Image (cartoon, rainbow, N blue to C red):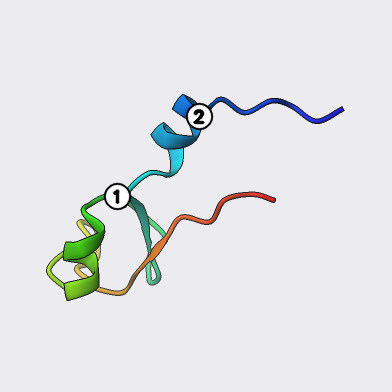
Amino acid sequence: MVKKTFPEAMARIYHNVFVCRVCKSKMRADPAKVKLGKVKCRKCGSRALRVKHKPL
């Protein structure tokens, strides 16, 4: 039986959350700023970020 996921929980966990490709730390940021390269990782200073993957 598949668990029901609530839209509020999905928004809280995945909306505007990015993961650093270098140190794998998570942060919340505006997608437009990430695309322009204005956001950097708090931990290592890298600008290589990706969207947090959703499970299938």
Front-lying residue, 20 or 50: 50
Front-lying residue, 31 or 37: 31
- Residue at left 38%, top 71%? 22
Vertical side of 39 occupied by 29: above or below: above
Crowdedness near tag 1: few (<14), some (14–19) or many (≥20) residues, C-alpha within 10 Å: some
Vertical side of 36 occupied by 6: above or below: above
Q: Which residue is mark 1?
A: 27
Frontmost of labels 1 and 2 is 2
The local secondary structure at tag 2 comes to helix
- Residue at left 64%, top 49%? 55
Question: Is disc 1 in contact with disc 2, using a CB cutoff of under 8 Å?
Answer: no
Q: Amino acid at mark 2?
A: Pro
Q: CA distance from mark 1 to mark 2?
A: 20 Å
- Residue at left 41%, top 60%? 51
The tag on residue 1 is: none
The tag on residue 7 is: 2
Could you tell whether 7 is left or right of 47 in the image?
Answer: right
Crowdedness near tag 2: few (<14), some (14–19) or many (≥20) residues, C-alpha within 10 Å: few
> Quarter-wise, where is residue 45 in the image?
bottom left
- x, y percentage for residue 21? 40, 70
- x, y percentage for residue 25? 36, 55
- x, y percentage for residue 26? 36, 51
Could you tell whether 14 is left or right of 41 in the image?
Answer: right
> Quarter-wise, where is residue 40 in the image?
bottom left
- x, y percentage for residue 17? 35, 49
Vertical side of 14 occupied by 37: above or below: below
